[in-house]
Every structure is written in structure tokens, then in C-alpha cells.
Amino acid sequence: MSDGKSSDCGPLEPEQANEPKIPETEKSSTPPSNDPLAGNFGFRRAAQKVRDFPQTPGVYLMKDASGVVIYIGKAKNLRSRAGSYFQATAAQEARTAEWIGEIADIDFMECDSEVDALLTENRLVKDIQPRHNKDLKDDKSFPYLMITTHEDFPRVEVTRSPKIKGAKLFGPFTSAGQLRGALQVMQRVFQFRTCSLDIEENDPRWQWFRPCLLASIEQCSAPCNLRISKEDYRRDIRRLQTFLEEGGQKLLGQMRQEMLDASKQLDFERAAKLRDEIQLLENLNRRGEIDTHAQPEVFYIDPKRGMRGLRKVLGMDRDPRVIEGIDIAHLAGQDTVASLVQFLDGLPFKPGYRRYKIQGVEGIDDYRSIHEVVARRFRRMADQEETFPDLLMIDGGKGQLNAALAAFRDCDLTPPVLVSLAKQDEEIFLPGQKEPIRLGRDSFALRLLQYVRDEAHRFAQHYHHLLRRKSAFRSAKDPKKGDTPRQRSPRPKKDPDTPNP
């Protein structure tokens, strides 16, 4: 993906129809023989399924007869956008004609907004690698707005390689072009610096430095020439952060009033400029949240230092080379699923990933769900004489940790080193200890645990729709069959994390 552009479907667009139209061949029990989709029962069933899709933003997933996801797209209106693939014209369009007949099923994920749908689509395509998504499969990432915090005079920049420490991040943003345009507008208001100079307030040599052109046109307060004090400059940066966090309605209101005044004075050129600037600033809200839309390819975790840190913090006799993490997710407040991810030498080992459909728990009960998953996982490993991981991490607090301990006790198994990580305050709970361990946000040990936790959460949330029918089928066929191992799809895929759902 480049600069937040979309996949083959094009950008999010107004929908042209409220209801999907079924091809004319479906109206007859004996469809014309010249319709290539007439006898495709799976296609007809998917077309009927789309009629019940919500009219909200989201992501839709096309599947073939084997249940493999072959295409992922986003939508402003799920029912209308997904339904357009089942209109008669879809089989004639060049971008869909070659594969439209492969559709045998369709599923969806609702999203909070169009931006959320775009970011979710990007993440899913990178993870699943559907064969008919031509774009979004590369390693390009979304841009961030970064404000440094460790410098005397913080700088502001647009970057695709943000720093983990020493910086305040906003984003990811969906369009690098719009973000850079908004940055220029904000710089005229808050006059921050965007250069990479290492400016120190106590170095008198900076008073002889010649500022760049931005100072002359009043877009920078020229800290490089010590024209502004450290305190005053940081006050401007705090105003900028407040604007970014709260939406800047006061500033936007002032600009709208200026635009109206310019229009009344027949200064249409200035009014048009203000209109464009207002639009750029409003587009700053078209961004995701780092916690929700984390990009693993962007935020690098030092695995070796993370393992050494965990060994020290947890009092282990060796580095935890094999770490497993478990997370519980609920589907529409009803069905419960669990994910297990495996890290080898501090990095994701995707052949070791597992998914579980919770079978023995009614309603929402995280404790009993964790008990079931841990029992199924480690009872099976013990029966097959497999080696337990060096460290098992449960997403949650003391209650979730105790549920996992109870599972080992009920199975009469000795657990590996066991911890839980509570997200609210990033506290680490250990068996037998009343007080949690609190590590600094920059701790390599904490960051590795967070990576495991976030990956388990992503794996559960982003794939739950793929295992609904598969897990139900397996459970009905063989109730004793526990975990759902990842399988190879009929066609080779680049990413081993791609299951055959």
C-alpha cells in the first residue's frame, strides 16, 4: 500500500444501490446456458447471504469452495458494496471477470468507521495474502505524525519509521499527502520546527546560526537561532498536542469565521485557501489508533534483549526461547474463541499458532474459557510427549492467571513459567505473588510480552470469522478433537499464517 491508497476496489466511495441485485438468471429455475454463474450454487448462496449484511462500514471476505479467502475488500456500506459483486455486470468487468466465478461464500467484519475499515483491510490482506488482492501485499506501511519528547526543542515530522521511545505518536494516518498538507497548515499556526538539528538551549553557538527560510515566512519560531526560549517553545508544542488530541474545534471555528469574512469582502482567493486548509485539518481525524491498528512491521522489538530481560525479571535459569501467549475473544457477545501464538527466540513462529472454539462454556466467561484452552492445549502436549514452552503468557490479570493455574492442577500437570499481563496498567502477575510486577514502559522485557499479547489479540480478533463454520464442523465430527492446527491451503501462500479456513 502506498500513502494510504486502497486495494483493487478503489477508494471508499458512495454506494450506488441500497440492495444487492441478484443476476437475472436467479429469477428462473432454468437459467440461460450462456450465463457462466448460472449453475454455481455457492455463488447464488453467497448472493443471498449478502442481503442480510448490515449497512455499516466494514470489511468483506470472499471465499472459494474450499473456504479459502480469495479476496478482501472494504466498504462504506457493507450490504451495498459487497452486493455489487453479485450484479450481472460484475462478471463482465475486467477487474473481477476472471475470478468472480470462484466465489462460493462471503463473510464480513463490521468496523467503527471508514478509516477503521481501510486500516483493517490493509492488515488482513497483509496477513492472509488473498490471491486476488493485487495491492496491499507489500511491506509498505501507513505514516505517523511524530513529536519528539527528549529534545530541548521538540521537532515534528511525518514518518513511516516512528521511534518507540522518546516520541509522541499520532496515527497511523490513511494518506501521507493529506497529512503533509495538514502539517504545513499546523506549522503556520504553531510555528514548530521540522528540521533534524540537535539544538541545545545551553549551547551559545546556536545564537550565531542562520535560520532557514521557514523562519523568514513565519512558519517556524527559529529555536536554531535561540529566538524563542525552551519554555515558550514547549508551550507551543503542548498546544499542538492538545489540538491533535481534541480535534481543534476552537481553531477550526476561527478559520471558518475568517473564511466567511473573506467571502463577504469578496476576497475569494483567501476564502478558497482557508477552505482547503480547513479540509486538510479536518482530515487529521482520518487516522487509526496505535493500540488498535498496530503495524508489527513498523515497531521493532529487540528479541534478544527482551528474552534476557524476561530471564532476569522472572528469575529464570535460562532465556525463554519458546514463549506462548493465549487470548480470549467473543464474537458478537455470544460465541467465544481463543488464540494461541508461539514465539521462537523472541519472534513470531506462525506454524505454531493455534485457534480454539470454546466448547464447554455457555455465555461469556473468560476464566472458564481460559481453563478450557489451557487444559486442552497442555493435556494434548503431555499425551503426545511434546515439550512445554519456556514461558506461557495469559492476557489478563490475576483472575485469568488463577484460571490457567487451575487447569494445570486439574490435569495434574506441572506448568511452565506462567505469567499474565493486564493491559490497563501493563502489570505482570506471577503465581503466588500478591503484588504485580511493574516495569518501565521502555523495558525490553515488557515490550516483548506486549508483542506476544498484541499478536495473540490480533490473531483472535482478525480471524474469528474464518473459523466459525470450520470449528463447528470439526466439533460436530469429533468432539474430542481439541485445538485447530493451521493447515495448508490448496494453493501455496507467501505467509504461513494463512490458514485453510
Image (tube, helix red, strand yellow):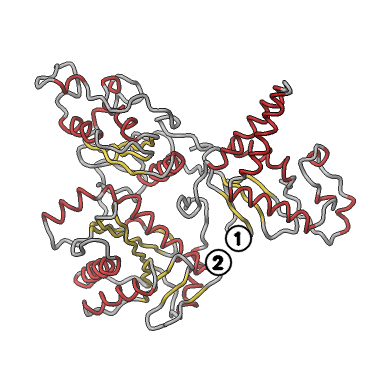
Horizontally, residue 165 falls left or right of residue 126, namely right
On screen, residue 272 above or below 170? above
Horizontally, residue 14 falls left or right of residue 413, namely right
Q: Secondary structure at mark 1?
A: loop
Horizontally, residue 330 falls left or right of residue 476, namely right
The outermost residue toward the right is: 208
In which image quadrant can residue 335 be found? Answer: bottom left
Residue of label 2: 441
Residue 102 - label: none
Residue of label 1: 165
Residue 217 position, x and y percent, is 80, 37
Between discs 2 and 1, the one toward the N terminus: 1
Q: Secondary structure at mark 2?
A: loop
Residue 272 position, x and y percent, is 66, 25
Find out whether the residues at labels 2 and 1 contact each other: C-beta distance under 8 Å: yes
Residue drawn 47% across the image and 76% down it: 311
Identified by mark 1, the residue type is Lys
Work out whether residue 376 or residue 368 is closer to the camera in this orientation and state it: 368
Identified by mark 2, the residue type is Arg
Residue drawn 64% across the image and 36% down it: 181
Residue 97 position, x and y percent, is 30, 23
On screen, residue 343 above or below 158? below
Residue 487 position, x and y percent, is 25, 51
Residue drawn 33% across the image and 20% down it: 93
On screen, residue 151 above or below 74? below
On screen, residue 99 above or below 376? above
Q: CA distance from mark 2 to mark 1?
A: 9 Å
